[in-house]
Amino acid sequence: MRLVLTSHLFLPDHVGGTEVLTLASARELQRRGHEVVVCTGRPSDVDVPDESRFDEYEYDGVLVHRYSRDARPASARPDHVDPLYGRWFGGLLRRYSPDVVHFFHLGNLSASAVDACVEADVPTVMTATDYWLICPNCQLRLPDDSPCAGPDADGVNCIRHAVADTQPGPVAAAFGLLPDRAVSFLVERIEGGAWGTGSLGRKAGNLAQRVGFLRERMNRLDRVVVPTRLMLDRLVAAGLRADRVVLRRYGIRAVQPVPRVADERGRLRVGFIGTLGEHKGAHVAVAAVRSLPAALPVELRIYGGLDFDPPYTRRLQALAGDDPRIRFCGTFPNEEIGTIFSGIDVLVVPSIWFENTPLVIDSAQAAACPVIASDLGGMSEAVEHGRNGLLFPAGDAGALARLLENLATDRAVLDRLSASAVPPKTDAEYVEEMLQVYAEVLAERRAGR
């Protein structure tokens, strides 16, 4: 088959779970003889002609088409609709005539790509790797870091969030006192252009339109593949037809087993592997280690790029201070993850949002490395407390510190958790399942459903 895959970001510039899953799927599909191209995006504040925003390159044998999306605040180009990209993607469909388009993410690209597929009558599958379809910040996380249940019918709660994020305290507080009916009235005025062309007016107008627009587009997809029941429930509650959803956990590239090397100083080596953004919660791990007695043999190794969110990185480094127990180790090629796990005793995943089954948890389980994760849906579907890992209340550095202290003083717990690791699905098994989904969609199209 000829297949087009999409991701909001891609390697080598960005190495996250969605990018790794997309690349692994592309390589496995190629190995099976299918023709694959990847379309990706990146935010850009460079002022160039629209036609110069598209380029292509090859990564690990995969042809990648890239769109540099105009992300300047003054551009007013919303994330959910982008006619420029829609027209370009329509041209790509005419060029390749793919059998199926598989969206792994549409951030930086927009759901205008879905419209292009509908117009060209190309079957579509989407793997929902986060909550982009229903949440503008992809995380279902409120300004106070508490979980969000998702957008209401007309996006009133999204408008409230935008005001809380962008307006001075007194203005945000006053707006927060307005009843939903009053906010709904304002939403109607916003959609009618009453807030003008200012930054907040554009943002509010985009949010007001986003909920309904994406609800309609996700129901134009032939299938939406989700890895967790949490994701399934959230999307269906937001309006996705239940008969379009398929529950399939991710698969990962086989982790080369590397024997764990004991620490010569007897330290409990705690690893954080992930994006250094606030939502991933590295600050929770740093605060937990900083609160432990200095004599306790613990070391925290933080693996992640320091340039993803520079203000957060600076805050994280300030929180770590000169504590010799905390090391910033940078990034590493994904194929070396087995070696990384050989040098740590436990992986900590302290995310403060509804993680959608981080691939790093599966990689840890493949390496028989115990996991300590936040007790939030998604992560708690992969980690069973006391069996293959431990759970703690999201954002509670004190609770995490107590778990680390217990492990540092009783290493037998680590051995028990390691022995109960749950082997994850491989990328080959995942692709086999996706090929079955493609076949079902194509059969339905032929039958005229």
Image (cartoon, rainbow, N blue to C red):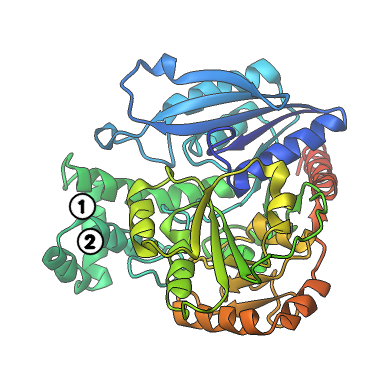
Q: Position of residue 13 (x, y in %)?
A: 53, 33
Q: Which residue is mark 1?
A: 189
Q: Is residue 385 above or below residue 423?
A: below
Q: Nearer the viewer, residue 386 or 41?
A: 386
Q: Is residue 278 above or below residue 53?
A: below
- At a point 53% along the width and 41% down the height, the residue shown is 106
- At a point 71% along the width and 21% down the height, the residue shown is 97
Q: Is residue 247 visible?
A: no
**Figure quadrant of the N terminus:** top right
Q: Nearer the viewer, residue 217 or 325?
A: 325
Q: Is residue 320 visible?
A: yes
Q: Residues within 10 Å of mark 1 (few under 14, many from 20)?
A: few
Q: Which residue is mark 2?
A: 185
State the separation of the CA atoms marked 1 and 2.
Answer: 6 Å
Q: Do callouts 1 and 2 mark residues in contact (Cβ within 8 Å)?
A: yes
Q: Position of residue 344 (x, y in %)?
A: 67, 62
Q: Nearer the viewer, residue 61 or 38?
A: 61
Which residue lies most toward the front here? 264
Residue 69 occupies quadrant: top left
Secondary structure beneath dot 2 equals: helix
**Figure quadrant of the C terminus:** top right
Residue 279 occupies quadrant: bottom left
Q: Which residue type does callout 1 highlight?
A: Arg
Which residue lies most toward the left here? 170
